[in-house]
């Protein structure tokens, strides 16, 4: 089993340049012919979480290539989190994908990473590289979350803070520091909407969604299903599953979904 190798990739130019940290595992002879795996994390998460680690370990056992990285303002990457938008993190995801991977890849996106993954597919297909995507595994996917899930729930105080300060803060159960949501994130989210027409993926999609998710309602996964082609799309609902889906049994389902796409079963 090859060991993950740390790397840095500069994305952007001039004052906009940020250093993106990545961990890559090369494919081995055992994994010849199998697609690689690319991890796309969620909002405020990093590449050292339990799901990302488990995916990397499974890829190592299978001989598959594996890429995980931190968006700017996240984890070990440079850049200011408050500068982050879907477009900015999408640019970094595509640049990292282009630099570190070759051949077909399975995109595994968690929460916001599911949105990023869907946008990556659109951008890759637009440049004639749709065959680089062997499949998608979307974990509690949150496409269009700024517009669909957050804007309708904004309080008057939050709307005022966005208008006056350009951001607002919100406590989170996932860490000691509050979440920060900027006006730029909301405005840019509208430019990256995917829940409008058919999302052509050209590859199998497996959605895994907890029904006890307090952040992304399970009906949002059904909404996403309506915008995906009818063939090769699977939805797994976990009755007591939360947003993180990091229990051993949840991770086992995620790994099985990735393995199923890799093996074509």
Image: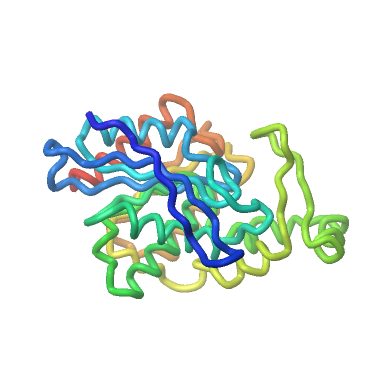
Which percent across, then down, holds residue 204? 29, 55
Question: Which quadrant holds residue 66?
Answer: top left
Can the viewer see residue 49?
yes
Which percent across, then down, holds residue 210? 51, 39
The outermost residue toward the top is 248
Question: Which quadrant holds residue 134?
Answer: bottom left
How did the renderer colour the structure? rainbow
Q: Depth check: give the residue in front, 113 or 67.
A: 67
* Side of 164 where 133 appears, left or right: left
Q: Depth check: give the residue in front, 248 or 171.
A: 171
Question: Which quadrant holds residue 148?
Answer: bottom right
Considering only vertical position in the picture, is 204 above or below 191? above
Identify the residue shown where x is 53% and y is 46%: 77
Considering only vertical position in the picture, is 263 above or below 154? above
Q: Quadrant of the C terminus?
A: top left
* Side of 124 where 237 appears, left or right: right
Identify the residue shown where x is 28% and y is 73%: 128
Considering only vertical position in the picture, is 81 above or below 144? above
Identify the residue shown where x is 40% and y is 44%: 7
Which percent across, then down, holds residue 164? 86, 64
Considering only vertical position in the picture, is 173 above or below 149? above
């Amino acid at each position: 089993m090859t060991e993950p190798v740390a790397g840095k990739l500069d994305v952007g130019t001039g004052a906009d340049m940020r250093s993106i940290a990545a961990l890559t595992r090369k494919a081995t002879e055992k994994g010849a012919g199998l697609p690689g795996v690319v991890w796309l994390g969620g909002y405020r998460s990093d590449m050292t979480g339990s799901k990302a680690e488990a995916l990397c370990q499974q890829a190592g056992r299978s001989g598959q290539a594996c890429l995980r990285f931190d968006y700017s303002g996240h984890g070990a990457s440079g850049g200011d989190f408050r500068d982050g938008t879907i477009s900015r993190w999408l640019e970094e995801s595509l640049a990292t994908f282009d630099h570190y991977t070759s051949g077909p890849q399975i995109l595994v996106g968690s929460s916001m990473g599911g949105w990023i993954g869907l946008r990556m597919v659109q951008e890759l297909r637009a440049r004639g590289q749709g065959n680089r995507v062997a499949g998608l595994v979307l974990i509690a996917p949150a496409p269009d979350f700024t517009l669909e899930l957050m804007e309708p729930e904004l309080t008057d105080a939050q709307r005022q803070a966005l208008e006056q300060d350009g951001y607002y803060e919100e406590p989170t159960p996932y860490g000691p520091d509050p979440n920060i949501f900027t006006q730029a994130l909301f405005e840019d989210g509208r430019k990256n909407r995917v829940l409008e027409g058919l999302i052509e993926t050209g590859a199998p999609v497996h959605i895994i969604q907890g029904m006890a998710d307090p952040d992304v309602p399970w009906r949002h996964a059904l909404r996403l299903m309506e915008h995906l082609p009818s063939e090769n799309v699977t939805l797994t609902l976990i009755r007591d599953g939360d947003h993180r889906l990091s229990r051993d049994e949840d991770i086992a389902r995620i790994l099985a979904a990735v393995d199923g796409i890799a093996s074509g079963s």
